[in-house]
């Protein structure tokens, strides 16, 4: 049986940061990823750019090295003070390189099937890869059992986003009230766009620079704009979307959320932070996930046809990529040693062991018109104790599934904060190991 200092399950934003930093700090680290690519929401989910957070952010080593590497690769720009504008395809290559540089062993297409433990300590995990499986299975899954491999570990980190490891161990989760859900999104990219024509039209129609921005960076045009059905402001694009509904190209619910960003290294392409799927439940059961993917893809096709008819510069545009995964804003949240609360954010509570510092707003999406929350806040800290299992001394969580109440989680779920969580946890584990 192989043995590691640290096993990280889930190669998304927080998992990659934790694994990279642990490897750099000389922890023997294994990163287990169920798909064939690292990056999670940033790559497979097309969630770019990474949102900007506090200038006082801590544990930024992973974000910093990622920015430098992506810039060298031609897949990063600093847009209006935000250096987190990444190319999602080049990011896949960069993350592979960074794991190799940190001596992190990566297992793709691999899942954890079992976890061995004593009363309060994880000792090993049993992993399984479908790439090793035979073409057929016996009805009792005997072939499946024969192909599992046990790996020992000193620490185990759940970076699955949905707290799948904690679920496997039947750990306790924080409960949601009936209205404490956020709708999924399914992102996509369109290419073949005349960005000059589109940007000129946007600047002419929308004078609100808090919504619509255009900037030349190294001779390349970049832009961003948005529109929702909420009455938070007078959206310049909303009458155009309503015309699409009136003419039968769009459904009324298609108006609920629209946001776009250009992509470094992908000229004449735009990434869409939509559609937001308000007709799905926002729960992570497999039937709802499947329905949401189907609903999302049909909505994307509708939106693309609408853009080609109503947006200047889109006449020859086409859908070049649809996300392989849903954008899930909230799912399971562990009950850790400390439950991070909305009052901690509003009051700027200080902690002895912060893993992140941020000022990203409380950002909670709703399927109801005018029901979303986007509340600016002061700087706040995220405590290490919210990453710690209440039951197992060497089990931790990073990412959107940490121990936080629903509204607090709406602020800390963004990528830079998740990067900091992973780095901060790795530093703690490396220090803890040296003194054991």
Image (cartoon, rainbow, N blue to C red):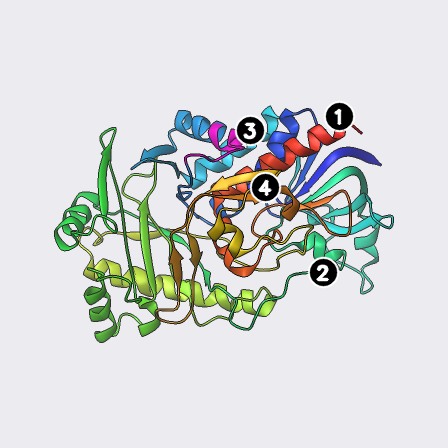
Residue drawn 25% across the image and 72% down it: 245
Q: Say which label, 1 or 4, has the lower sequence index.
A: 4
Real-space Cα separation, disc 4 to disc 3, in angstroms = 31 Å
**Type of secondary structure dominating the magenta stretch:** loop
Q: Which residue is mark 2?
A: 172
Q: Say which label, 1 or 3, has the lower sequence index.
A: 3
Asked if residue 56 is among those painted magenta in the image, a careful observer would answer yes
Residue drawn 74% across the image and 58% down it: 171
x%, y% of residue 377?
41, 50
Closest to the camera, between mark 2 and mark 4, is: 4
Quick one: 86 or 17, which is closer to the camera? 17
Q: Please, which residue is most extreme toward the left here?
A: 204
Quick one: 183 or 220, which is closer to the camera? 183
Q: Which residue is mark 3?
A: 98
Q: Say which label, 2 or 4, has the lower sequence index.
A: 2
Q: Residues within 10 Å of mark 3 (few under 14, many from 20)?
A: many
x%, y% of residue 265?
34, 35
Q: Give above or below for 343 relative to 56.
A: below
Q: Which residue is mark 4?
A: 351
Q: Which residue is mark 1?
A: 434
Q: Give above or below for 408 relative to 385.
A: below
Q: Residues within 10 Å of mark 2 (few under 14, many from 20)?
A: some
Residue drawn 39% across the image and 68% down it: 371
Q: Secondary structure at mark 4?
A: loop
């Amino acid at each position: 049986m192989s043995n590691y200092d640290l096993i990280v399950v889930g190669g998304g934003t927080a998992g990659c940061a934790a694994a990279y930093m642990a490897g750099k700090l000389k922890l023997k680290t294994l990163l287990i990823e169920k798909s064939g690519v690292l990056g999670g929401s940033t790559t497979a989910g097309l969630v770019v750019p990474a949102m900007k957070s506090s200038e006082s952010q801590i544990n930024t080593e992973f974000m910093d090295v990622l920015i430098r590497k992506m810039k060298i690769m031609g897949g990063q720009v600093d847009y209006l003070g935000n250096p987190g504008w990444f190319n999602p395809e080049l990011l896949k290559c960069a993350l592979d390189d960074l794991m190799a540089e940190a001596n992190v062993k990566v297992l793709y297409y691999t899942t954890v099937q079992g976890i061995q433990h004593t009363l309060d300590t994880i000792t090993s995990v049993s992993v399984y890869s479908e790439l090793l499986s035979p073409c057929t299975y016996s009805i009792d899954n005997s072939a499946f059992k024969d192909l599992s491999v046990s790996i020992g570990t000193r620490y185990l980190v759940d970076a699955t986003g949905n707290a799948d490891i904690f679920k496997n161990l039947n750990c306790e989760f924080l409960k949601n009230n009936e209205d404490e859900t956020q709708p999924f999104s399914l992102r996509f990219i369109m290419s073949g766009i005349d960005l000059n024509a589109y940007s000129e039209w946007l600047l002419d129609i929308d004078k609100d620079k808090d919504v619509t921005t255009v900037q030349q960076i190294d001779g390349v045009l970049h832009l961003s704009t948005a529109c929702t059905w909420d009455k938070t402001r007078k959206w310049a694009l909303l009458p155009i979307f309503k015309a699409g509904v009136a003419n039968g190209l769009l459904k009324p619910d298609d108006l609920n959320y629209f946001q776009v960003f250009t992509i470094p290294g992908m000229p004449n392409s735009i990434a869409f932070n939509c559609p937001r799927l308000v007709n799905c439940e926002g729960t992570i059961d497999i039937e709802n996930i499947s329905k949401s993917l189907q609903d999302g893809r049909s909505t994307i096709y509708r939106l693309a046809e609408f853009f080609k008819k109503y947006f200047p510069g889109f006449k020859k545009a086409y859908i070049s990529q649809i996300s392989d995964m849903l954008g899930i804003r909230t799912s399971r949240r562990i009950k850790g040693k400390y439950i991070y609360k909305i009052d901690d954010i509003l009051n700027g509570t200080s902690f002895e062991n912060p893993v992140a510092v941020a000022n990203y707003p409380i950002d909670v999406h709703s399927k109801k018109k005018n029901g979303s929350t986007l509340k600016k806040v002061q700087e706040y800290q995220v405590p290490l104790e919210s990453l710690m299992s209440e039951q197992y001394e060497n089990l931790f969580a990073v990412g959107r599934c940490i121990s936080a109440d629903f509204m607090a989680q709406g602020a800390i779920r963004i990528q830079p904060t998740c990067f900091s969580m992973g780095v901060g946890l790795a530093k703690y584990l490396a220090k803890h190991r040296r003194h054991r």
